């Protein structure tokens, strides 16, 4: 009797795991998610910032090159994984993103055992370097690194603004809007996977459409995205004050699913500083823009970002900014110390404010803002807000109101021993008490 031969199945070659490490802002998070979506489409095992690395892992570091602290963090991270590669604890190290775009020759000369350096627009080349194909059918598809119920939603790349202190145009290039129809498709795909909140990001949201449609077209984009079934919140980040398209405020008033929230980095208020920073508007015009936004959208939460220690900033310039912060009472505020960046217009100026003075001034601004935030939060006690639950953390469910972005703004804490909420769900919360940057409350039916 003939024995039947059993042929063994041919084992498929296992592709190396790719561990993507993201540094910097939400634009980098978005870029990492696009990269991860492409890698998954190429059958790679993809993880984001894995706790443990394997000796065969490919590590892709998406760097930030914006200011000194961010650059140092990126360099430290490259060195960390470069050392692990030297020890045989990871397979390959690839560097991409803003730092690599800006300083590739210097990085190649200094950190030589990195396998490859790529810039901000080198996705196809990066994929090729690991044996993956760029799949056009995956345009807009991403592997979210955020909880699935919210997603950063990039509507444009690059920036045409001439701000003297900013290196972003050097790293990201000129402004390039994504067509509305493509963005609507991307939003629909996200909603199918459970996304409820779109956080619109760009280097400058308010410039959207000028390159494609010959006019600022953010208002039309907002209407189209607002119409996507399942989108419950749309949030605007990074709006530029000069040439601000006031018509978007009408859409905000018309549509319940557009959050009454505006992130508008204003940087300074002194006319001397605004002129040197090349911001394109004066102190009075800045004040007028803020007042008009607040007048046209009652109850809107306004977030801004300021810079202390810009070249030539006098004590009087700084006092003027402090007085303005006290008077304006922004709902949310962040403050950076000036970073002297090569190839920017301001690099030709003398960086004449000592580092400790820069920091003292930033601390003073944040101390003022802490008091403002406390007072504004006390006014919320007894009120009920719609809250999106982001996570369970220790003894609390943690969420946000429409007036708060993730990571940077206030949080609402709900005692988990009293109430139960599902992550990603909306609940109504009555605020019982408040601190400087946190609200505490109970779920109400």
Image: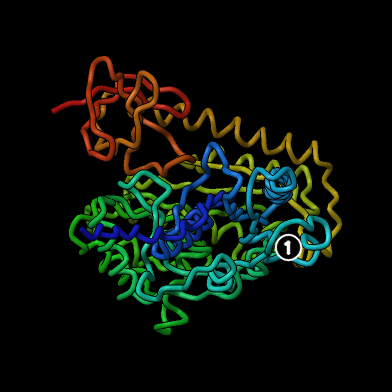
Which quarter of the figure is the C terminus placed in? top left
Residue 222 location, x and y as percent? 31, 65
Left or right: 114 as drawn, with respect to 293: right
In this view, the residue in front, 425 or 334, is: 425
Which residue is under mark 1? 276
Q: Residues within 10 Å of mark 1 (few under 14, many from 20)?
A: some
In this view, the residue in front, 50 or 10, is: 10
Residue 262 location, x and y as percent? 42, 52
From this viewpoint, which residue is outermost toward the bottom?
214
Left or right: 169 as drawn, with respect to 155: right
Residue 94 location, x and y as percent? 64, 58
Q: Is residue 153 visible?
A: no
Q: Residue at x 55, y 54 (%)?
A: 265
Q: Residue at x 41, y 44 (%)?
A: 405
From this viewpoint, which residue is outermost toward the front?
1
From this viewpoint, which residue is outermost toward the left?
445
Indicate whether 159 appears above or below 37.
below
Quadrant in the rendering for residue 39: bottom left
Residue 175 location, x and y as percent? 53, 74
Q: Is residue 76 visible?
A: yes
Q: Residue at x 29, y 60 (%)?
A: 5
The image's colour scheme reads rainbow
In this view, the residue in front, 236 or 273, is: 236
From this viewpoint, which residue is outermost toward the top?
417
Element type where label 1 sits in the image: helix
Which quarter of the figure is the N terminus placed in? bottom left
Q: Residue at x 54, y 58 (%)?
A: 286
Left or right: 12 as drawn, with respect to 277: left
Indicate whether 72 appears above or below 289.
above
Q: How many marks?
A: 1
């Amino acid at each position: 009797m003939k024995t039947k031969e059993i042929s063994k199945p041919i084992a498929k070659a296992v592709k190396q795991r790719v561990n993507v490490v993201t540094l910097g802002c939400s634009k980098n998070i978005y870029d990492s998610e696009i990269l991860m979506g492409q890698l998954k489409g190429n059958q790679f095992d993809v993880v984001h910032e894995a706790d443990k690395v394997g000796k065969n892992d490919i590590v892709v570091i998406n760097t930030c090159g914006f200011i000194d602290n961010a650059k140092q963090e990126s360099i430290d991270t490259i060195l960390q994984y470069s050392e692990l590669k030297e020890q045989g604890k990871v397979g390959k190290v690839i560097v991409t993103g803003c730092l690599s775009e800006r300083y590739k020759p210097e990085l190649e000369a200094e950190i030589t055992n990195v396998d490859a350096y790529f810039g901000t627009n080198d996705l196809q080349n990066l994929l090729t370097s690991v044996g993956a194909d760029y799949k056009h059918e995956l345009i807009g598809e991403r592997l979210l690194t955020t909880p699935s119920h919210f997603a950063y939603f990039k509507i444009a790349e690059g920036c045409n603004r001439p701000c003297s202190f900013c290196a972003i145009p050097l790293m990201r290039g000129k402004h390039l809007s994504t067509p509305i129809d493509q963005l609507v498709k991307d939003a629909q795909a996200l909603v199918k996977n459970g996304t409820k909140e779109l956080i619109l990001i760009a280097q400058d949201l308010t410039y959207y459409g000028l390159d494609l449609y010959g006019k600022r077209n953010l208002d039309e984009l907002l209407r189209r995205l607002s119409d996507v079934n399942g989108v419950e919140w749309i949030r605007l980040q990074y709006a530029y004050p000069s040439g601000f398209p006031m018509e978007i405020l009408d859409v905000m008033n018309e549509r319940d699913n557009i959050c009454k929230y505006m992130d508008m980095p204003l940087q300074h208020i002194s006319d001397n500083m605004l002129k040197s920073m090349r911001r394109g508007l004066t102190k009075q015009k800045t004040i007028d823009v803020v007042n008009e936004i607040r007048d046209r959208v009652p109850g809107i939460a306004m977030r801004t970002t300021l810079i202390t220690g810009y070249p030539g900033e006098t004590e009087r310039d700084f006092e003027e900014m402090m007085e303005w912060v006290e008077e304006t009472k922004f709902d949310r505020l962040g403050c950076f110390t000036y970073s002297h960046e090569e190839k920017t217009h301001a690099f030709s100026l003398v960086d004449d404010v000592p580092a400790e003075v820069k920091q003292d001034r930033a601390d003073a601004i944040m101390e003022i803002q802490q008091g403002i935030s406390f007072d504004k939060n006390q006014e919320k006690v007894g009120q009920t807000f719609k809250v999106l639950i982001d996570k369970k953390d220790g003894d609390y469910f943690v969420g946000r109101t429409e007036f708060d972005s993730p990571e940077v703004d206030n949080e609402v804490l709900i005692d988990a021993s009293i109430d139960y909420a599902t992550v990603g769900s909306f609940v109504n919360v009555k605020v019982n008490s408040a601190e400087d940057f946190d609200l505490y409350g109970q779920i109400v039916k």
